[in-house]
Image (cartoon, rainbow, N blue to C red):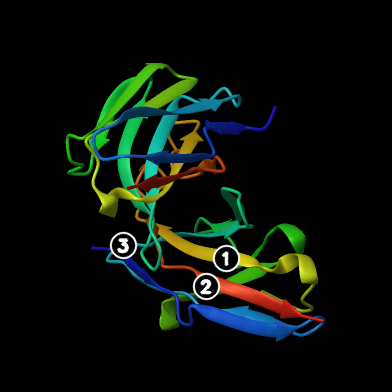
């Protein structure tokens, strides 16, 4: 098992669809993150969960809804997206403990295309 | 506020040549600095990190980076490029070891020619 696994790897959806991205980490970490990676732009941190509790929401539109049922799983629920939401969505995890939060391990990402 | 600037969105080198990828940071406090690599169709992998210990940091795959406070730089180097080094490289900064927030640069794509 790789450390951080994301499914699906590719997703095409219409603007009226509802879909979910899944992330699973096998590293025993306590913190999980969603990032958006768009062409020519820096990675944007979207959400942070520590010990299943959301601790950061960087002004992300409500059409993105995260869910963290336990420390190993993280979901990103999508609905009524816009074409500008097309991007690579990366999940990451860290130990989440004092002194280890900024050492993050990334999954391979989900390439999302919104038509 | 912190920021990272990566000079050059594309760098091309010949196999066996020196690799130099530039990163300059802005931070009001002593920074923690990172280099990540992203191979095609993969996530980001940590290459190396600077956490206020030695200014010359050695990472994986023969890469190293030197923290220069006077120049606010953290450039990534490798003495001899290999074809397998072709990837996108990201510099990132955080203001503390106890923060989740990493500020990333826009990345530099490295091409290696035979």
Q: Position of residue A72 (x, y in %)?
A: 50, 20
Q: Is residue B82 visible?
A: yes
Could you tell me if the residues under marks 1 and 2 are in contact, i.e. CB atoms within 8 Å?
yes
Task: Identify the mark at residue B88; answer none if there is no mark.
Answer: 1
Residue tagged by mark 3? B29
Mark 2 belongs to chain = B
- Quadrant of residue A49 within the rendered picture: top left
* In-front residue for pair B29/A84: A84
* In-front residue for pair B30/B83: B83
Q: Are marks 3 and 1 on the same chain?
A: yes
Give the spatial CA distance, label 1 vs label 2.
5 Å
Q: Mark 1: few, some, or many residues within 10 Å (few <14, many ≥20)?
A: many
Q: Are marks 2 and 3 on the same chain?
A: yes
Task: Identify the mark at residue A106; answer none if there is no mark.
Answer: none
At a point 48% along the width and 82% down the height, the residue shown is B8
- Quadrant of residue A28 within the rendered picture: top right
Q: Position of residue A69 (x, y in %)?
A: 38, 14
Mark 3 belongs to chain = B
Q: Mark 2: few, some, or many residues within 10 Å (few <14, many ≥20)?
A: many
Q: SS of the residue at dot 3?
A: loop
At a point 46% along the width and 38% down the height, the residue shown is A91
Q: Earlier in the sequence, mark 2 or mark 3?
A: 3
Q: Mark 3: few, some, or many residues within 10 Å (few <14, many ≥20)?
A: few
Q: Is residue A92 above or below residue B113?
A: above
Q: SS of the residue at dot 2?
A: strand
* In-front residue for pair B21/A76: A76
Residue tagged by mark 2? B108
- Quadrant of residue B59 within the rendered picture: bottom right
Q: Position of residue A45 (x, y in %)?
A: 33, 47
Q: Position of residue A67 (x, y in %)?
A: 33, 22
Q: Is residue B76 visible?
A: no
Disc count in the image? 3
């Amino acid at each position: 098992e790789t450390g951080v696994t994301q499914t699906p790897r590719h997703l095409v959806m219409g603007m009226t669809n509802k879909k979910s991205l899944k992330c699973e980490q096998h590293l025993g970490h306590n913190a999980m993150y969603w990032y958006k990676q768009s062409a020519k732009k820096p990675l944007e941190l979207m959400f942070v969960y520590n010990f299943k509790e959301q601790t950061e929401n960087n002004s992300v539109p409500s059409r993105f809804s995260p869910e963290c049922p336990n420390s190993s799983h993280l979901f990103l629920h999508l609905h009524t997206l816009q074409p500008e939401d097309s991007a690579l969505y990366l999940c990451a995890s860290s130990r989440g403990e004092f002194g280890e939060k900024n050492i993050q391990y990334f999954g391979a990402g989900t390439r999302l295309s919104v038509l | 506020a912190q920021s990272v600037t990566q000079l050059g969105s594309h760098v091309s080198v010949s196999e066996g040549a020196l690799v130099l990828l530039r990163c300059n940071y802005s931070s009001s406090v002593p920074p923690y600095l990172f280099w990540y690599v992203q191979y095609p169709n993969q996530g980001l992998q940590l290459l190396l990190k600077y956490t206020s210990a030695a200014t010359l940091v050695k990472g994986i795959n023969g890469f190293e980076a030197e923290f220069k406070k006077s120049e606010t730089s953290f450039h990534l180097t490798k003495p001899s490029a290999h074809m397998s080094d072709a990837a996108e490289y990201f510099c990132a900064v955080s203001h503390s070891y106890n923060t989740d927030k990493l500020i990333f640069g826009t990345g530099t794509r490295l091409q290696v020619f035979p």
